[in-house]
Amino acid sequence: MRSQVVASWLAAVLALPAVGGAQEPVKDEAEETDRKKLEEDIARELGAPPAPGEAQASPQPGAAQGGAGQGAAGSGDAARLARLLMLPDLSAVVSGAMAYGTYDIEQRSPRSGPFGPEGKPAFLFEELELGIQAVVDPYARADAFVAFTPEGAEIEEAYLTTLALPAGLQVRAGKLFSPFGRQNQQHPHAWEFVDAPLAQSRLLAEEALSGAGVDVSWLAPLPWFATLHLAGQSTAPGEEDPTALTGLARLEQFFSLGDAVTLGVGVSAARRDEPGGGAFRDLGGVDLYLRFRPLQSRSYLALSGELYARRFRGAEDAPDGTDTGGWAQAFWRHGRHLGYGARYEWAPSAGEAASGTEQRAAALLAWLPSEFQRLRLQVAYDRRPGGEDGLETLLQLEFGLGAHGAHPF
């Protein structure tokens, strides 16, 4: 009996290590399972895709996986939205016209606007203006406009505008339209009439006075809107003019004359270096803008006009005295789809026309199916010095695509 008890005790002592060695693998497998499960949970929280067959392997994690998947999808949507918001606004404005004239406009009244050959109707592609605009950061925004014409591509404007300067200051730097006059700062699709006034192209610049430089503006703390511009640019008003430094100043003010009437008044001046030591080209201008628009109507009446003066000082082969010109127009937008306009203008004659003052009167009919396209018929009667009169007709189609920022009021 005693021998059996000792044998049982020895067997139990010898068996303990054997039992412990059999339980250890079970414990390791459980820890490994927990570790893998924890790694999988962390991976799901980080948005990693589930392992192949994982959803079928365990229904419980499936519910959690759905939530995590939605979270990952939400993160993806947010990232895509963020990338979309970083894209700049793109726009395109396309214009073309059918032109007919009873005289040789190119020789007797040269200009930058659309015109056809004498006595023959012609279809003209004017331009495609591509606009790229975006906010760069909280401190600046950028705008660029490229014009594609039959003559080629040209950067009309490309500049940076500050957004957070103190004391009402703002700076634009790059290539930009000069802050001179009202219409010179507008792109052609912002004009009420199809072409630019003669005085603008004869006295200011063939296309638009513009160039690389800096424009510093100051919004005065007054009860009405008043802004002073001081700019320095390198300009070339005509194709034959070399690029030269130009200093500009402009004061523009807007007054509210009631709930429906606004009056704008602008005064501009510029001095440009001309070839030859001490030679200059002085420019002056005054512009008026009166707009009447009832609050509860899409109809409005806009009256506007500009006067230009140009004088060369010390420049060789330049006209003597002071040249002047101007234009005045009225445009009535009747409801959503129709517009009517009338314009009178005068400017120094050019080309093969006799020396003197050229006058032109034009009437306009506009049909606007929407705010993104318009069809305009412009008929003008041109009287040049020496009794050489002529008739011009333009039928223009214009349409816009994409987002396009607002132009100056």
Image (cartoon, rainbow, N blue to C red):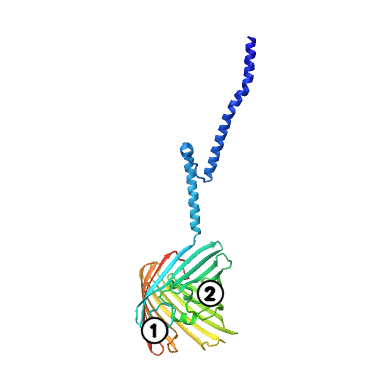
Q: Position of residue 209 (x, y in %)?
A: 50, 77
| In contact (CB < 8 Å): disc 1 and disc 2 | no
Q: Residue at x 48, y 69 (%)?
A: 145
Q: Which residue occupies the extreme top position in the image?
A: 1
Circle 1 crowding by C-alpha within 10 Å: few under 14, some 14–19, many from 20:
some
Which residue is label 1 attached to? 104
Q: Quadrant of the N terminus?
A: top right
Q: Splitting the image into 4 quarters, where does residue 331 fall?
A: bottom left
Q: Residue 311 shows which numbered tag?
A: none
Q: Position of residue 258 (x, y in %)?
A: 44, 71
Q: Position of residue 376 (x, y in %)?
A: 37, 73
> Does the rendering let one see residue 298?
no
Pick the residue in front: 273 or 48. Answer: 48
Q: In the visual, does 355 lie left or right of 390?
A: right
What distance separates the C-alpha of mark 1 from that of mark 2? 31 Å
**What is the count of numbered marks?**
2
* Mark 1 residue type: Asp
Pick the residue in front: 95 or 81. Answer: 95
Which residue is label 2 attached to? 211
Q: In the visual, does 25 lie left or right of 297?
A: right
* Mark 2 residue type: Gly
Mark closer to the chain start, 1 or 2: 1
Q: Secondary structure at mark 1?
A: loop
> Does the rendering let one see residue 22?
yes
Q: Position of residue 53 (x, y in %)?
A: 47, 39
Circle 2 crowding by C-alpha within 10 Å: few under 14, some 14–19, many from 20:
many
Pick the residue in front: 42 or 259. Answer: 42
Q: Is residue 328 above or below residue 69?
A: below
